[in-house]
Amino acid sequence: MSKLLTRRKFIAGAAAASLLAGCDSHPITGFLGAMKDWNQGFEGAIFSPARMAPELPPSAATPEAAFPAYFISDEMPDVPDNWSLTVGGLVDHPMTLTLDQLRELPGTAMCVRHHCVEGWSAVAAWHGVRLSDVAKLAGPRAGVRYVEFKSFDEGYWSSWDLGSAMHPQTLLAYGMNGHDLAVGHGAPLRVYSAVKLGYKMVKYLTEVNFLAANTGGYWENQGYDWFGGV
Amino acid sequence: MPVSHDPRFKGRPEQPLAIRLVHWCNAVFIVLMAGSGLQILAAYPSLGPRGAQYWWYPLQGMSPPSWMRLGGWLGGGRHWHFAIAWFFAINGAIYLGYFFASGEWRRRMFLPWRDAGGAFLQFMYYLRLRKTPPPEDFYNGLQRLAYTSVVFFGLVMVLSGLAIYKPVQLHFLTLLFGGYDGARVVHLGGLALIAMFVASHLVLVAMHPREIVTMVTGGRRE
């Protein structure tokens, strides 16, 4: 409970900070707010945990120079010394994993189309660990309904429905197109999923938290839809 | 417009209430959908995926002017678009249900074997290549072609829109349009066709202003 309160305080603080910084905030209320909620319910209802995005041949990959790399920091976020990933929240076995430990877990690769909220698409192969495999190690408790991802990119974060997070095509990715993740694409570790829009896939990952409450997200709190599925 | 001479329509107004309601709702929805759609387009005003944009699209990288857009920003445009989409689609479904259940399709739907010749002659008449219009039967062939086509365009817009909205959950639909970027082409092309329809519709209505009254009051009864 105290954790929940601090998280709420954190969000309120983040919202106040963005107002102070002059960022546009777009609360969606009234008719549009009601329809946004309705559409989010619709998105959740048509999401199928078993439906797989078509896999593409590696030859379909977008030239990497043409694959946009977004971050919110003023400069491209550098990997901190002694980086590790914290897996926590309502889990039986909270963990801290180094990149080497993640690489030792059974890995997978997929080449899929990326869909950005802006309307563009691009293709890349991603290499990493299924988040569902990491979840098995951590052991989420009953009552977990959301997964929160945090980063060292100026505090960029997002939270997901558990179903999309446990989809077989949702990875903690450390590689792209056969090489280590480049700094622009979220090194050393990022979320990559075939079933979400780009802004849901947190780069420069530091924390994965299994939670009972929805903690919003960086763009979500500025008015973009929270579900953000494709 | 001339009566249909079909005894089935005896006593029925030229534009029954259901069609009038759907028509005027649709006019509002089309404006809102086009405006919010162009707001979304402005975030990536190009066709084709990153690194392989389509060479043939002449407006590559050109944003629609701001007076055409609705929503103010990408998120706002998306909220408007996905909100009104439901009303647009349900309105269209009501129209199609009424269209077939009431038998209105008999005097409105373009049937090539009945209407193709008349549509061609009417087109020649508009081009001043023919002095008199072909005989009309409620609608002329060209009207039937235009009104039937635009309903089809509306259906394509709903389906291609869904294909862009959920390219993984509905990937069979997305595949039908040649993939995600293909569906964006169809969706924008559909907007262009509907815009052309609306432009010519407005010109012809301006030339026959009595039809506006008919679309409000229902017009004469057959």
Image (cartoon, helix red, strand yellow):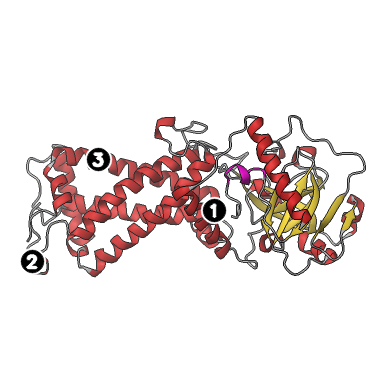
- Say above or below: B22 vs A139: above
Q: In the picture provided, is B56 more to the left or to the right than A133? A: left
Which residue type carries mark 3?
Answer: Ser
Which residue in the structure is indicated by mark 2? B10
Residue B29 lies, in percent from the top left, at 35, 48
Image disc number at residue B200: 3
Indicate the chain on which mark 3 is placed: B
**Magenta part of the chain:** A218-224
Circle 1 is placed at which residue position? Answer: B179
Q: CA distance from mark 2 to mark 3?
A: 30 Å
**Mark 3 closeness class: few <14, some 14–19, many ≥20 residues within 10 Å:** few
Asked which quadrant contains residue B11, the reply is bottom left
Which amino acid does the dot numbered 2 rest on? Lys
Badge 1 amino acid = Gly
State which mark lies toward you, 2 or 1: 2
x, y percent for residue B45: 51, 36
Chain of the residue displaying label 2? B
User: Where B64 sits versus A98, above or below?
Assistant: above
- Picture coordinates of residue B201, whole percent (x, y): 23, 43
SS class, disc 2 = loop
Quote the CA–CA distance across marks 3 and 1: 31 Å
Along the viewing direction, whichever of A33 and B55 lies nearer the viewer: A33
Q: Local crowd at mark 1 within 10 Å, few (<14), some, or many (≥20)?
A: some
Disc 2 or disc 3, which is closer to the eye?
2
Identify the chain of the residue marked 1, using the numbered disc in the image: B
Of residues B83 and A213, the one nearer the viewer is A213
Alpha carbons under labels 2 and 1: distance apart: 48 Å
Q: Is residue A177 magenta?
A: no
Label 2 close to label 1 by CB (< 8 Å): no
